[in-house]
Amino acid sequence: MTASSSSPSSSAATKITVFVVGPQKSGKTSIANHLADLADSLNSSEYHPTRGVRILEFDRAINPRNKEIVISVELWDCSGDPSFMANWPAVASSANAVLFVCSPEKKQEKELELWHSMFSFLSDSQMCVFGHKIGVSAVKASKPKFAKGLQRVPFVLTSLDEPDHLKNEFDMLLAAAHTVHAENRERDEQAILAARY
């Protein structure tokens, strides 16, 4: 699957809202910056915690089944600070997809399970876990032992050292979210037509 990013401009694009969530210092902002092609922020090694949420908007052209689709992405880079957790259930319902980010070297399963519970209305195909490696690590990364709900969610090891892999995995999440969005829209339109006749 190939894709490209650009600034928001396409009026025909389908809007997909993706939440990027997970524990503090797991690389959520670095991933969000990379996906939005914010080159000035990509090479920073300083940690700056996100306060609340940072919303990035960009267009992404994806090619599932060799048919180009332009997605207008609204990416919510959410703080992992527990003091903001009470706010997320109120806005989580606007998500079309969620990207959980964790450090595969740390035990963060319980935190991810808490985040997962806020997005239980989404299907597994509308979710993905990025086990994100920050910098060089001597620890061999592997899939964490998740509880039942998260076990079915796709898990991918990522690193900014492999930027194309990261974007390709994100594009697969977008394609799945787009499919569900289109099916829901068609079902809603058919229900409206059926009610009129």
Image: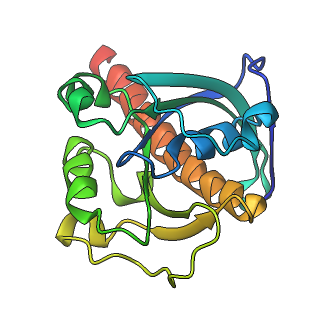
Q: Looking at the image, which residue is at 61% across and 53% down?
A: 170
Most extreme residue toward the bottom, as rendered?
140
Q: Position of residue 120 (x, y in %)?
A: 22, 48
Q: Residue furthest front?
A: 46
Foreground residue among 180 and 103: 103
The answer to which quarter of the image holds residue 15 is: top right
Q: Quadrant of residue 94?
A: top left
On the rendered structure, is 20 left or right of 153? right
Residue 186 vs residue 170, the one in the foreground: 170
The residue shown at (24%, 54%) is 111
Which residue: 76% across, 44% down?
43
Q: Where is residue 83 in the image (x, y as percent from the top left)?
A: 22, 29
Q: With 97 as the anchor, is 136 left or right in this view?
A: right
User: Which quarter of the rendering shows the C terminus?
Assistant: top left
User: For the N terminus, which image quadrant?
Assistant: bottom right
Task: Decide which of 179, 15 is in the foreground and name it.
Answer: 15
Q: How many marks?
A: 0
Lateral position of residue 192 relative to residue 169, left or right: left
Quarter of the image holding residue 82?
Answer: top left
Residue 17 placement (x, y as % from top left): 49, 31
